[in-house]
Image (cartoon, rainbow, N blue to C red):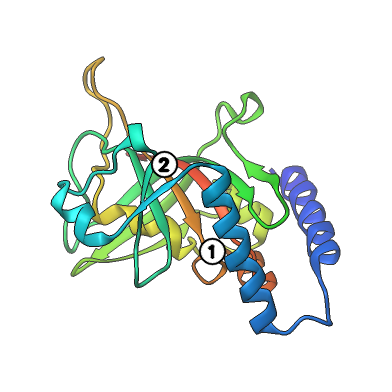
């Protein structure tokens, strides 16, 4: 795991250096991020719906129309591929959640990080999630997270926590049950520390399963 962490941190240091531009203001960086997200939406033929329509549809997104709901407060775009099995994380509950993910840097147009490959078949990102009156907070468990190893932080990106209001987090008990799966477009201020400091958005595919 230490070797893995070194490889990812070295890679991210390269990304940091390559993307750094001292001549850009924060406002210019945000404009570039918005333009990159807009282009990604267009290139991916994504249909954006608002939260009112999302509610009218029973908090679902129509996959046949490639719908994503724009969460106005956070700026996160979310597509619920599968609601999941089991139950939602209840108010006042602390749960262990297992995740597999793929992270795509929208600004750099590149696959940046994933634990969803054969090499990591036995590795899932494990995090602790707490529901406090509908507000979710989370932290990766050190030593059991590719994200924590890569970015040197156990803080779960805020964007990763957005789906918990709408998905069930359980463990399949029958062949018909499936774990929750979402696609997310996460702006820099809802992302991890590198995305936040370098002002770039990421596209994620994430599955959520309840740990033991």
Write down the quadrant of residue 183 in the picture: top left
Write down the quadrant of residue 182 in the picture: top left
Q: Residue at x 24, y 56 (%)?
A: 165
Residues packed near mark 2 inside 10 Å, few (<14), some (14 to 19) or many (20 plus): many
Estimate the x, y position of residue 147 in percent, counting from the top left: 59, 52
Q: Is residue 184 above or below residue 200?
A: above
Estimate the x, y position of residue 13 in percent, counting from the top left: 81, 61
**Which numbered circle lies on residue 181?**
none
118 horizontally vs 141: left or right: right
Estimate the x, y position of residue 54 in percent, counting from the top left: 23, 53
Report the quarter where the C terminus lies: top left
Which one is nearer the viewer's eye here, 126 or 77? 77
Q: Residue at x 38, y 58 (%)?
A: 161
111 horizontally vs 7: left or right: left
Label 1, label 2: how far apart the Cα atoms are? 18 Å
Report the quarter where the N terminus lies: top right
Q: Callout 2: helix, strand or loop? A: strand
Which one is nearer the viewer's eye here, 15 or 127? 15
Estimate the x, y position of residue 190 in percent, counting from the top left: 49, 67
60 horizontally vs 19: left or right: left
Residues packed near mark 1 inside 10 Å, few (<14), some (14 to 19) or many (20 plus): many
Q: How many marks?
A: 2
Disc 1 target residue: 191
Write down the quadrant of residue 63 in the picture: top left
Can residue 211 be seen in this snapshot?
no
Disc 2 target residue: 98
Which one is nearer the viewer's eye here, 64 or 145? 64
Q: Residue at x 59, y 37 (%)?
A: 115
Q: Is residue 126 above or below residue 154?
A: above
């Amino acid at each position: 795991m230490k070797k893995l962490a070194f490889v990812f941190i070295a890679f991210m240091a390269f990304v940091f250096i390559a993307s750094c531009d001292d001549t850009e203001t924060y406002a210019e960086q945000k404009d570039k991020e918005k333009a990159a997200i807009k282009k990604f939406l267009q290139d991916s033929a994504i249909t954006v719906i608002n939260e009112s329509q999302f509610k009218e549809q029973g908090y679902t997104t129509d996959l046949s129309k490639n719908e994503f709901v724009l969460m106005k407060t956070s700026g996160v775009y979310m597509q619920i591929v599968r609601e999941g099995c089991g139950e939602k994380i209840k108010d006042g509950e602390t749960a262990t959640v297992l995740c597999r993910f793929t992270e795509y840097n929208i600004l750099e147009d590149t696959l940046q990080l994933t634990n969803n490959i054969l090499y990591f078949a036995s590795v899932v990102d494990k995090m602790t999630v707490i529901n406090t009156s509908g507000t979710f907070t989370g932290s990766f468990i050190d030593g059991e997270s590719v994200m924590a190893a890569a970015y040197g932080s156990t803080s779960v990106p805020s964007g990763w926590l957005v789906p918990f209001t709408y998905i069930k987090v359980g463990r399949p008990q029958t062949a018909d049950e499936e774990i929750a799966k979402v696609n997310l477009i996460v702006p820099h201020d809802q992302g991890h520390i590198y995305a936040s400091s370098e002002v770039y958005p990421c596209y994620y595919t994430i599955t959520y399963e309840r740990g033991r």
